[in-house]
Amino acid sequence: MLTFKKAIQKGIVYLNPFTNFSPHEGKVEIRWDPLTDLTSRIVHFPVKKIGKFNFNDTVEGSLHSKCPFCPENIERMTSRFDKGLFGFERLERDGVTVIPNILSFDKYCLVAIISKEHFVDMDTLINGNYLLKGIKALIEALRIINDFDKEAQFYSINCNYMPMSGSSILHPHIQAIAGEYPTNYHGLILDKSRIFCKDNKRVFWDVLMNEEKDLYDRYINDDGKVYWYAPFAPKGNVDLGCIFQKNSIFDLTDADMNSFGTGLHKILTYLKMENISGFNFSLFSGVKDEESFRANMRIVARRFLPPVNASDANYFNKIHMESACLLFPEDVAEEAREIWSKKII
Ligand SMILES: [Zn+2]
């Protein structure tokens, strides 16, 4: 039912300096996302595993000015909610503090400070379940908004983890936005899901889960509640997808979140094993009462590229609305699946 369309574009033959200038024909695989039709490019080029990033200088540099998210500074340096509207000034849950973002990127823009520690490495992040706790606290705060503001329809929970992902504050935090206008991508996947459902009388995400599981090329694992896979048209070198069985983040039960937490633990373990210590994620919620969508998430690894610590986002992402990478999602899925089969947690 779905089309996993791809094309190989052969490049001009060049004389390769790494193989004594023997002729080499470059190749790029162009893939069309089965829902959005947005293209991604996967360059055929041997990839060396990048070493672990050393955070020593970054941590030291981050302490040159006071960190607003360190526990002793939160009270004085971070913003507060209107207690009359929210019932609290700051939401404290399970070691997480939720505050309004000082920068209003949307009608509602929330920040969850997910750790007491100023710097958290991947081991601590994984074992402390900090992301899960932060997401749960944000859903609780967003639920209040959802109850009192019927105009705000578009909800997502997002993360820039560590400076390589675009985070300007080192102290671990995640964010949520809610408002009356979706971002380009959130709006696009909602629209395309509506169109698919109207045309096919089925939910795209359900069809995708079934087809990917049958193909077993990019499928990673599912437990009936939460489904993990490596999307066909990746948004980065390591792009991991997660699909819930529910439309909205507000429909997710404790059992759903427990299942999600178990999978997230394994996915983060996979990233750690790949020496990845920075990432972005976005968890998209469907619009209330629409049956054409499933709440879903993308986690995209981010890293500084040696030797000059270059950004791994470039003109493709910033201007062309294109993703370009060197790793195939089929290889990523195969390796990530091993975390489940080896029971590494
Ligand atoms: Zn801090």
Image: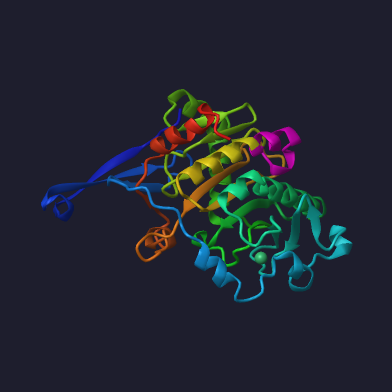
Query: On screen, 199 above or below 114?
Result: above
316 to the left or right of 339: left
Please give left or right for residue 237 compared with residue 109 in the image. left
The stretch drawn in magenta includes residue 258: yes
Q: Residue at x 76, y 68 (%)?
A: 72
> Start and end of the magenta stretch?
247-261
Left or right position of 306 against 158: left
Closer to the camera in the image, 259 or 59: 59
Ligand 1 is located in which of the four quadrants? bottom right
* 260 over 75 or under it: above or below: above
Q: Nearer the viewer, residue 216 or 71?
A: 71
Q: Is residue 36 visible?
A: no
Residue under the image location 51 percent in, 61 percent down: 55
Q: Quadrant of residue 234?
A: top left
Where residue 237 appears, as percent x and y from the top left, is 41, 48
The overriding secondary structure of the stretch rendered in magenta is helix
Q: Quadrant of the C terminus?
A: top right
Point out residue 316 in the picture as x, y percentages from the top left corner.
Answer: 38, 58
- Tell me which residue sits at (47%, 38%) in the image: 230
Residue 279 at x, y = what percent?
Answer: 52, 53
